Amino acid sequence: MIAVAVLAAGKGTRMKSSLPKVLHELGSKSLLVRVLDTVDSLDPQKQLVIVGYGADRVRASLQHRPGIEFVEQREQLGTGHAVQQLLPALQGFDGNLLILNGDVPLLRSETLKLLVQIHHECQNDATILSAHLPHPQGYGRVFCDSHNQLREIVEDRDCNAAQKQNHRINAGVYCFRWSKLAAVLPRLSADNDQQEYYLTDAVTNLSQVMAVDVEDYQEILGINDRKQLATAANILQNRVKDEWMMAGVTLIDPDSISIEDTVVIQPDVVIEPQTHLRGQTTIGTGSCIGPGTLLENCTIGENVTVLYSVLRASQVADGSCIGPYTHFRGQVQVGSGCRVGNFVELKQTTLGDRTNVAHLSYLGNTTVGTQVNIGAGTITANYDGVHKHPTQIGDRTKTGSNTVLVAPLTLGQDVTVAAGSTVTEDVGDDALVIARSRQVVKPGWRLPNSDPPEAV
Ligand code: UD1
Ligand code: CA
């Protein structure tokens, strides 16, 4: 039986921000959500989040996650004081409590599972996660005997010169037998450099405590300032990109590419330089994305190419070619085998299979059938200054260059629109529409008073 508590009450003074530290984002998720995601894999019986600074904002940020119990720490008097606030909520709880700082977003769930497993096997009062850091400044130092039995944890600012030489640090992740921790919690004192109640003192006061080293120390980096946030973002990116490369995705110039960890990519996809993949984006096998492309919440089929384009909240089916310089502003569905090309903007628009919008067009609130050819410079005039109006274009219809379609408008199937037309009325199936004034030619015409034509 395991309960989890995440410490998220601190302001995070070193972030120099009005936003509570745990709400700062790392790859589109807050630090706190990342910690809670890691914990999910343990399937805890109870999830407690200790809130204090900016409590309402922290609560609101977790509205979409049911089953979280919030415990308030009104004054932030230290990590030990934060955990003291759990005493009423966990009265009579007879299991293990995993406690995590809310600012360790890179932790892997395998590491947590290992910590809990060792805690069980060795029947410890507490098992703490530790690591050997090349630069341990700022972290509490862990002192153990030769059997990894903990003697004490000393905070960086309370360490003497000799203690500072110890590079083994406390990760801020602990598994406690709750009844044992509850017994020592009320006895904490704030007799230290910060005048705070330290959770680490409670650990030192228990008898059977073991430290477990994490293999990859990058996992336990705590985020205290913006520099560490940027470092963590880098580590996360490298992790995500390494995983996709190992899964069969080619990244050309990986340093110039960013991929959020919510993205899913099939094998044999090529991601070209300067490409950014965000949100709930998925990419099918054989597709080539980039260079110079941003995809956000997009579903891309197989064998699609997207070149120098920005696509948001849209879907592209198999074998279509998008770009260069295409902008999908959202709710765009492109069928299979389509070409959407150079300098084209689409919004709330559906294209049927094998339809082309190849050059210099804007289509908004438009439903286009299959095998349609939208001529260069075709524009839907969908906005009358107050409302947006729809346009429907039937299968196999062709619009000539520089066509304006004034919505609301329906063009049937097999319609041809003459170049330069401004179409304002619906057109039925199988028709040619010419909506422009006829060309007038006046031979020999000159401006009055201009010289007469030279005799030949
Ligand atoms: C803490 C540990 C240190 C460890 C480091 C790992 C203590 C005393 N020190 O130091 O040994 O090496 O984490 O990253 O525990 N918080 C509250 N209420 C408070 C104070 C803090 O909820 O009154 C929360 C913060 O929101 C944060 C977490 O506790 O999520 C850690 O606090 P922080 O001030 O960052 O502790 P460190 O100084 O980093
Ligand atoms: Ca910290």
Image (cartoon, helix red, strand yellow):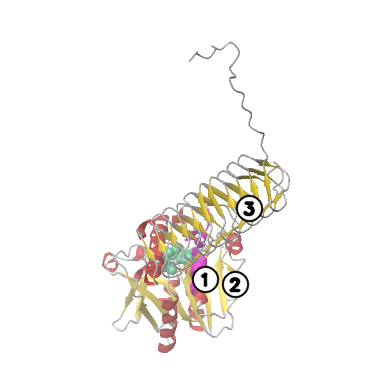
Which corner quadrant of the image does residue 400 belong to? top right
Q: Residue at x 47, y 72 (%)?
A: 100
| Residue 255 appears in the picture as rendered | yes
**Type of the residue with mark 1:** Leu
Q: Nearer the viewer, residue 143 or 243?
A: 243
Question: What is the CA distance from the residue labelled 3 to the residue labelled 1?
Answer: 53 Å
Indicate the secondary structure of the residue bearing disc 2: strand
Indicate the secondary structure of the residue bearing disc 3: loop
44 above or below 402? below
Question: What is the CA distance from the residue labelled 2 to the residue labelled 1?
Answer: 10 Å
Q: Is mark 1 within 8 Å of ligand 1?
A: no
Q: Nearer the viewer, residue 322 or 127?
A: 322
Q: Nearer the viewer, residue 357 or 120?
A: 357
**Type of the residue with mark 3:** Thr
**If you read the primary sequence from the N terminus, does the residue marked by circle 2 or circle 1 appear first?**
1
For the magenta stretch, what is the residue range? 18-38
